[in-house]
Amino acid sequence: MKFCCQCGASVELRIPAGDTLPRHVCVSCETIHYQNPRMIVGCIPEWDDRILLCKRAIEPRYGLWTVPAGFMENGETTCQGAARETLEEANARVEVGQLYALYNIPHISQVYILFRARLLDLDFSAGAETLEVGLFAQDEVPWDQLAFATVRRTLTQYFRDRGNGEYRFHTGTIEPVRKP
Ligand SMILES: [Zn+2]
């Protein structure tokens, strides 16, 4: 951040009185511009023994597969956000169900919140940010072409849970991939 979005003056990085971390503070109107983690909301849409996945038409990870998910918008609930993303990316209608996974990704300041969801019909198709949408059984999931570590981890647990006959809530922290 270089300029204040309130008044257009420049900002400086300093620790405001009573705070503990450096913030962008406007040199003119003194507005403190806090930057906080972003929430990514999404779901695992289910249809019998298959789940819906989307092939990404946007960077990052163009051409790789993911569950429908995206940045939460102001003024919506996490469930509404998950349903909206599913509609936008896969033109699919879902009934959002159980909270399934919450992952912290501190190195990129994101929090992933994923639900299980029931696909309401098979009238789905690729949205603007999607190349292709499909339903996959466990042995059909393109495991070597998944877009994100969160998706791989979530789906691995999901099918393990299904095998055990009990879907548990999962949480954890995703660490950065270390280059050898
Ligand atoms: Zn200002």
Image (cartoon, rainbow, N blue to C red):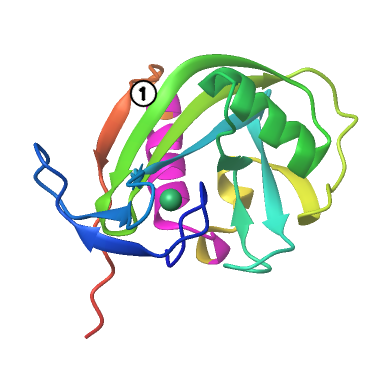
Left/right placement of residue 68 relative to residue 39 reads right
Q: In this orientation, does residue 137 appear?
A: yes
Q: In this orientation, does residue 49 appear?
A: no
Q: Residues within 10 Å of mark 1 (few under 14, many from 20)?
A: few
Say if the magenta span includes residue 62.
no
Number of numbered tags placed on the structure image:
1
Left/right placement of residue 132 relative to residue 137 reads right
In which quadrant will I find the N terminus? bottom left
- The foreground one among 64 and 37 is 37
Residue sitting at 80 percent across and 31 percent down?
A: 92
Residue sitting at 90 percent across and 30 percent down?
A: 123
Residues shaded magenta? 145-162
- The foreground one among 46 and 19 is 19
Residue sitting at 33 percent across and 20 percent down?
A: 168
Q: Quadrant of residue 63?
A: bottom right
Q: Is residue 159 above or below residue 56?
A: above
